[in-house]
Image (tube, grey):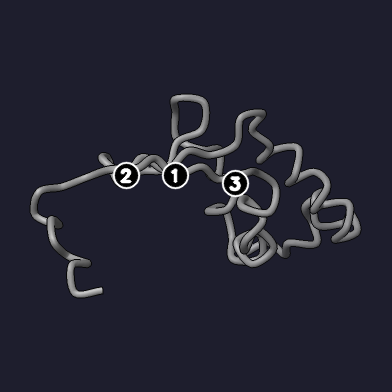
């Protein structure tokens, strides 16, 4: 297996890599969590986070970065099965 230091990306300073990741992850309108679907969306599609799955080192550097880079909006939802769930409060 090749060393990650052979990658031009990993030869850059970590701070510079984080800047690059920020540009890669940035969504103008942020992320939307759709309650009904139970999914996270960015501009009507799945967010760009595939780079995070390329290796463990990048996955570690990506931890929390998508949510520090973008605002997160939640849609509200209602399911009859949840009706009365908080009546005891």
Q: Whole-Å distance between the Cαs marked 2 and 1? A: 7 Å
Residue 51 image label:
3
Picture layout, residue 88 above or below residue 31: below
Q: In the shown orientation, is residue 5 left or right of residue 67?
A: right
Viewport quadrant of the C terminus: bottom left
Q: Quadrant of residue 10?
A: bottom right
Q: Residues within 10 Å of mark 2 (few under 14, many from 20)?
A: some
Provide the residue designation for mark 2: 35
Q: Residue at x 59, y 59 (%)?
A: 55
Residue at screen point 44% across, 28% down: 45
How far apart marks 2 and 3 lie (CA) works out to 26 Å
Mark 3 crowd level (few <14, some 14–19, many ≥20, 10 Å Cα): few
Q: Which circle's residue, 3 or 1, is located before the other in the chain?
A: 3
Q: Disc 2 vs disc 3: which is toward the camera? A: 2
First along the sequence among labels 2 and 3? 2
Please tell me whether mark 3 or mark 1 is closer to you in this view: 1
Give yes or no for contact between labels 2 and 3 (Cβ–Cβ under 8 Å): no
Secondary structure under the numbered disc 3 in the rendered image: helix
Give above or below for 45 relative to 59: above
Q: Give the label on residue 60, or none.
A: none
Residue 41, placed above or below residue 58: above
Residue sitting nearer the eye, 4 or 40: 40
Image quarter where the N terminus lies is bottom right
| Quarter where residue 39 is shown | top left
**Marks 2 & 1, CB-CB < 8 Å contact:** yes
Check disc 1 and report the residue beneath it.
Answer: 74
């Amino acid at each position: 297996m090749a060393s990650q230091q052979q990658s031009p990306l990993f030869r850059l300073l970590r701070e510079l890599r984080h800047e690059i990741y920020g540009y890669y992850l940035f969504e103008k309108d942020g992320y939307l969590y759709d309650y009904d679907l139970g999914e996270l969306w960015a501009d009507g599609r799945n967010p760009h986070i595939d780079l995070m799955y390329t290796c463990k080192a990048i996955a570690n550097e990506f931890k929390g970065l998508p949510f520090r880079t973008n605002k997160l909006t939640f849609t509200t939802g209602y399911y009859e099965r949840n009706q009365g769930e908080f009546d005891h409060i």
